């Protein structure tokens, strides 16, 4: 017998539908905020559950575990750790521009936002700003829906009095999309909303005059160019360059960093700076101290090596090499009033939120108008009772069905009759009649005002604007992030960072290399390994590259700062370079790149070359030139070079041509000489090098 309750689907269709349902759930019910209140479902449920527990900003703190229990037990059937982590983020002043939760205890730190204590230890209540989301909740402003088990109701949205989606921002990763909305300043957003209320056709460029950039809670500097910021608000996507704020103490000369980019750890920054100091790549700084405390959450002190250090250049280097400068991604992706996720520009966000605010205020006024009419209806019945008090008392005392008799005698409604029957004797005094008349007059005036507002959109917009101004005054503050466009920071070169010091590099016959400070080092007196002895040495500056030449005419380069100290016996040069089989080091060179040298072979042939042409950035080095043929070729001198021809043509030029070992030949039509530095396989070896005199006869062979 076939079971008709079973639905049979192809696996492809089932998987497609299941993944689509999951994707829509993640997008709409987990990861993206709603434009109306700027909250994700878990955040909205936390705020609502805390309000139901009576945890207002003026109440006493209660254990966070109690709030989390209510949230996951009544509205959000998910893990308690995920719920508590969302609650912690809403309480961290370095994560939220205007925190929604006021916490007591360990709620994490900028160094490690996830270092918060367990929920059984911390206590919490709603922050002051949360009142802007909840103040109108019980005034018929939002729709309600059943919770997950249908036993309770929860608000689908909160009646936000401010554009919270931009006020606090949020981040989230959904399926196929993500959101990165930075926080902004309340006062600036309110000014933009007021302008948009008066000028609905205002462009993004005009709104950016009121909202120039995000306003992060850490108070860093925003250094993006104005056109980049404008493009972000026009397209809803982009990057904001943020930079730490610092100053130089006039008395001590110390550099003090007191504001970091958003979500940058102070300890991480100190670690990055310390790593450069340990690697001897930042000798401009003598020490780094962390003086952060409760009064100064971020205070990193950099101690320059001397007062002559250029602070601007040093900080520019740190901006380029550490997290002191960070680019923050912006992706204004959110769920709109139509229930669809989309990236919106600044005008679309504010316009759509103002539309929601218009709907919310309209519903609030209609709700209040209904309450006023209901109360006036009751007062009208009570007034009839007071004017006919004797007859009312008689009906109540002697009639079998006083309610029906009252309704028929005085044309009362059921609600009016119930209120009359519920009156206490103490309320039958003359004073109560006067109170009713006074209340009626007040309610009639209020009803007239409500009807006037609901019937005139301009007056309704004016009311919304006045409420925005009140909230900006109540919750707003000054901008924390300075907006000042600056060019991208550039790291200092090694020569600019590390001072040039005299250095002597020593090479042994076995190929062990080392370096010592100063030029007064005597390499002959150094200790060498058994069977090894001194071969060559070179003197120069620590900011100059060391050039090594092997017996096969190949050149290599090393940074003398990377060499072991001369106090030791050094390291094999093969650990730093890829030397060809059978080759051996025959010489060292240090000096200016324009210094010229004569490189000679055992056969007596050689050429003149600039030191810069022998420098290489590869471990395998490079040949100083190109050769054709083998050892049978003879060196020939050029016949038309002239005494002024330059013998130091670069070996890397494609027009260079050699016809024999150690040979130089003038290319037809090109003045001067070109070096032939590559020695033939199995041929003669490089024998040595010597500085080249500018008066050297360029037509002669160089003998060593």
Image (cartoon, rainbow, N blue to C red):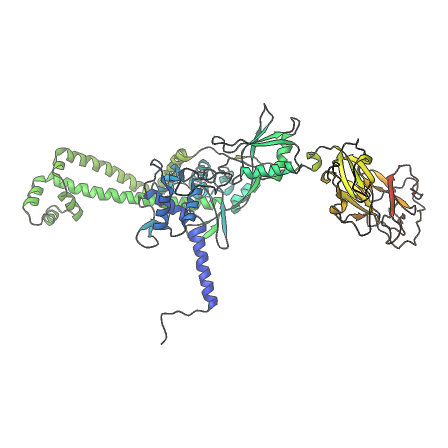
Q: Quadrant of residue 393?
A: top left
Is 13 left or right of 69, judged from the image as shown? right
Depth check, front residue: 623 or 420: 623
Residue furthest to the bottom: 1
Is 49 left or right of 113, judged from the image as shown? left
Task: Tell me if residue 372 can be seen.
Answer: yes
Asked if residue 103 is positioned above or below residue 256 in the image, the reply reads: below
Residue furthest to the top: 251
Tell me residue 386's x, y (percent). Answer: 12, 39
Tell me residue 240's x, y (percent). Answer: 55, 41
Residue ID at (64%, 33%): 314
Depth check, front residue: 287 or 370: 287
Residue ID at (13%, 44%): 421
Asked if residue 24 is positioned above or below residue 253 in the image, the reply reads: below
Q: Quadrant of the C terminus?
A: top right
Tell me residue 357's x, y (percent). Answer: 38, 44
**Number of marks in the image?**
0
Tell me residue 374's x, y (percent). Answer: 22, 44
Q: Quadrant of the N terminus?
A: bottom left
Depth check, front residue: 422 or 403: 422
Is 353 left or right of 490, judged from the image as shown? left
Residue ID at (59%, 32%): 288
Residue furthest to the front: 530
């Amino acid at each position: 017998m076939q079971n008709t309750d079973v639905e049979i689907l192809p696996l492809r269709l089932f998987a497609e539908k299941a993944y689509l349902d999951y994707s829509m759930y993640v997008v709409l019910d987990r990861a993206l905020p709603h434009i109306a209140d700027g909250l994700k479902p878990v955040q909205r449920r936390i705020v609502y559950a805390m309000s139901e527990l009576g945890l207002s900003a003026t109440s006493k703190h209660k254990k966070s575990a109690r709030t989390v229990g209510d949230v996951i037990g009544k509205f959000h059937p998910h893990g308690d750790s995920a719920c508590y982590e969302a609650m912690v983020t809403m309480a961290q002043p370095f994560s939220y521009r205007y925190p929604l939760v006021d916490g007591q205890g360990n709620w994490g730190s900028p160094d490690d936002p996830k270092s918060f204590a367990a929920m059984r230890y911390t206590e919490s209540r709603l922050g002051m700003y949360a009142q802007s989301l909840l103040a109108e909740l019980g005034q018929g402003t939002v729709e309600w829906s059943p919770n997950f088990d249908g036993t309770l109701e929860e608000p689908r949205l909160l009646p936000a009095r401010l554009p919270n989606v931009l006020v606090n921002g949020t981040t989230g990763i959904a399926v196929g999309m993500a959101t990165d909305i930075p926080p902004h300043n309340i006062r600036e957003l309110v000014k933009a909303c007021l302008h948009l209320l008066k000028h609905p056709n205002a462009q993004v460029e005009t709104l950016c005059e009121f909202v120039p950039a995000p306003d992060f809670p850490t108070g860093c500097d925003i250094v993006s160019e104005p056109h980049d910021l404008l493009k972000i608000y026009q397209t809803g996507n982009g990057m904001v360059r943020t930079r730490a704020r610092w100053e130089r103490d006039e008395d001590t000369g110390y550099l003090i960093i007191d504001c970091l980019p958003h979500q940058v750890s102070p300890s991480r920054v100190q670690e990055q700076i310390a790593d450069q100091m340990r690697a001897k790549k930042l000798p401009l700084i003598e020490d780094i101290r962390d003086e952060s405390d409760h009064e100064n959450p971020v205070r990193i002190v950099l101690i320059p090596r001397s007062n002559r250090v250029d602070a601007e250049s040093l900080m520019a280097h740190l901006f380029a090499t550490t997290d002191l400068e960070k680019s923050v991604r912006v992706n204004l992706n959110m769920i709109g009033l139509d229930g669809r996720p989309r990236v919106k520009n600044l005008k679309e966000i504010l316009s759509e939120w103002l539309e929601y605010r218009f709907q919310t205020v309209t519903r609030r006024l209609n709700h209040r108008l209904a309450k006023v009419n209901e109360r006036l209806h009751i007062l009208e019945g009570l007034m009839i009772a007071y004017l006919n008090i004797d007859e009312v008392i008689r009906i109540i005392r002697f009639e079998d069905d006083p309610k029906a008799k009252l309704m028929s005698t005085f044309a009362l409604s059921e609600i009016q009759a119930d209120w009359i029957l519920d009156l206490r004797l103490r309320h039958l005094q003359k004073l109560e009649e006067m109170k009713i008349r006074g209340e009626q007059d007040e309610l009639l005036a209020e009803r007239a005002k409500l009807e006037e507002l609901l019937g005139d959109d301009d007056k309704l917009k004016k009311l919304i604007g006045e409420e925005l101004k009140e909230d900006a005054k109540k919750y707003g503050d000054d901008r924390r992030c300075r907006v000042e466009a600056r060019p991208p920071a550039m790291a200092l070169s090694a020569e600019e960072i590390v001072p040039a010091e005299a250095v002597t590099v020593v090479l042994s016959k076995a190929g062990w290399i080392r370096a010592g400070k100063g030029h007064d080092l005597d390499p002959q007196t150094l200790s060498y390994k058994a069977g090894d002895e001194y071969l060559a040495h070179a003197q120069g500056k620590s900011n100059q590259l060391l050039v090594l030449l092997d017996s096969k005419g190949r050149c290599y380069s090393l940074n003398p700062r990377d060499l072991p100290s001369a106090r030791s016996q050094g390291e094999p040069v093969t650990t730093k370079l890829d030397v060809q089989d059978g080759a051996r080091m025959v010489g060292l060179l240090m000096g200016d790149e324009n210094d010229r040298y004569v490189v000679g072979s055992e056969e007596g042939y050689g050429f003149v070359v600039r030191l810069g042409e022998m420098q290489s950035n590869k471990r395998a080095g490079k040949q100083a030139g190109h050769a054709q043929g083998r050892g049978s070729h003879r060196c020939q001198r050029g016949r038309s070079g002239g005494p002024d021809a330059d013998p130091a043509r670069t070996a890397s030029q494609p027009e260079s041509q050699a016809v024999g070992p150690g040979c130089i030949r003038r290319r037809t039509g090109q003045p001067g000489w070109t070096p032939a530095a590559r020695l033939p396989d199995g041929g003669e070896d490089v024998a040595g090098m010597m500085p080249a005199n500018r008066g050297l006869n360029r037509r002669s062979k160089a003998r060593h």
